Image (tube, rainbow, N blue to C red):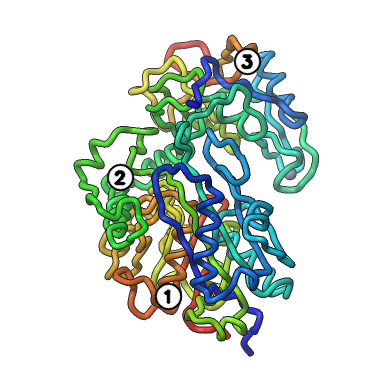
Amino acid sequence: METSIPAGRPKPLADADTAPFWAAAQERRLSVQLCENCDRAIFPPKPACPHCVRELAWRDLNGRGSVYSFCISRMNFIGGYKAPYIVAWVASDEHPECIFNCNIVDCAIEDVRIGMPVEVVFETRPEGVTVPQFRPIREGAPA
Amino acid sequence: MRNPKRAAVVGTGSTEIVRTSDKSLGHFAVEAARNAIRDAGLKTSDIDGYVGSPGAPNASALNLDGLDEVSQLFMIGALGLEPTWAMDVVGMSTGMLVAGAQALAAGTCKYVLGVRAHYNPKDRKYSVSGANLAGGPDQFTLPFGYGPGGTRFALWVQRYMHDYGATRDELYEISALARRHARLNPLAIWREGPELTRDAYMNARWIHEPMCLFDSDMPATGAGAFIMTTAERAKDLPQTPAYVASYANATQPSRVFSDIGLRAGDIQVAQLYDGYSVMVWNTLEKLGFCGEGEGHLFATADRLSLGGALPMNTFGGSIGEGRLHGMGHVREAVLQTMGRAGSRQVPDVRYSLAQVGVLERFWSVLFSSEEPD
Ligand SMILES: [Zn+2]
């Protein structure tokens, strides 16, 4: 019995803590938890602030950030992904403690660099879900 | 005054380590347990404590008890145990030692059997995910093509190389060292070599660039076991005890040394988890062998080889022996402490370290060949 790689990309299964993130993405907003006590943003979502254990609110980020790190995945492990592709950690400009796992889209694999400025772009998939991805901010392009 | 309830390892057991097998994992686990019990000079009926860590970590795992995982319930049934204490822990093999030491200190049992087994499926690719849905922590990884095969460590090392000028030339040394030491370990998958040449490493296929095939250990099927008891009871058993001198987790990692008044440089031999080669740089820094960003400079072949100042992964590590989720590291740390490591033996071992786990979650256990005060 060979595990076959499904044709589609895995669909996020939201829970009560993460549902606001996915609902915001559906509306093309990048939303994260914020602790008003610590003035820190929290991502991925947590049941409470990991610094002071207070309740968390949600707020939208401006969607801009930079590539904190990246790799080029050159093997096929996951449904809907054909190697080679870029996997990155993107740090939010407003809250660099927020690091998003994502693909850098609209970018050749040779061109991705640490520190590269990127902006969020929302990818609506055939599986019926919208996920935030990031693409390079090109000079001269509207911010 | 010495603590009579201090834990000591008094026996180890292993099975063969193979790529895949027709036997279920339960079969391997029972064999490892039997070997450890015999090594400690005990009978199965003496065992009144059990600790395991059953989780199958791979994306294609079926998570079936006795097939690709082995729980305390399976082992109790398989060996006919009647334990007064039994537990499965998260935290891999060093976490099992810590739990066992606590149970002995509390006096809830006399002889603890610890078993960890790892299964590489014969009929499925180890790391291929068949998931259509990704819940829990996976919802922020798998939908982005992030997950199996060490994506996280490739991202980590790319940033590390950027910040500290580390190179793949330096990373090669970790895997090459593992393969050299494995040739001295009769259990190792790479026991017959060949050595890993710089050319073979540099030309290997990428998994997640900048990590290549040889930066990863090899999924394997096998099991390891240990027997722990108190320092007091250890004196009546045949093996020289490997006393548990201290332990610490990744939140305060250097306490494994400072709690007993030592510094990292005071130990004679270290087994550091190397599921991916890049982990070793981070662990050397976290434990205080060197400063932040200096792991890649510290980890030279000269220093870490047998005969060097800090022989590391003297059994070949996971990269040379095969992936047993740290049971190889524990076995080797114990054998080095007992003076039973054969052609790999480091002379005059007083302190021997086993560290298993990654980045922000691991346990280190320091063994001593002399009973600590
Ligand atoms: Zn807070």
Residue bearing the label numbered 2: B167
- N-term-proximal mark, 2 vs 1: 2
- Name the residue: 60% across, 19% down: A131
* Quadrant that contains the C terminus of chain B: bottom right
Q: Residues within 10 Å of mark 1 (few under 14, many from 20)?
A: some
Q: Residues within 10 Å of mark 3 (few under 14, many from 20)?
A: many
Identify whether B158 is placed above or below B259. above
* Host chain of mark 2: B
Identify whether A106 is placed above or below B313. above
Residue A130: assigned label? 3
- Name the residue: 49% across, 81% down: B238
Question: Residue B273 placed where, x, y %?
Answer: 45, 55
The quarter of the displayed image where residue B75 is located:
bottom right
Split into quadrants, the picture shows ligand 1 in the one at top right
Question: Residue B56 placed where, x, y %?
Answer: 56, 43
Element type at mark 2: loop
- Can residue B153 be seen in the rendering of this structure? yes
Residue A113: assigned label? none
- Callouts 3 and 1 in the same chain: no
* Quadrant that contains the N terminus of chain B: bottom right
Q: CA distance from mark 2 to mark 3?
A: 38 Å
Identify whether B102 is placed above or below B146. below
| Amino acid on which disc 2 is placed | Thr
The quarter of the displayed image where residue B338 is located:
bottom left
Q: Is A89 or B112 nearer to us in this picture?
A: B112
Q: CA distance from mark 2 to mark 1?
A: 28 Å
Element type at mark 3: strand
* Host chain of mark 1: B
- Name the residue: 57% across, 43% down: B67
Element type at mark 1: helix
Residue bearing the label numbered 1: B266
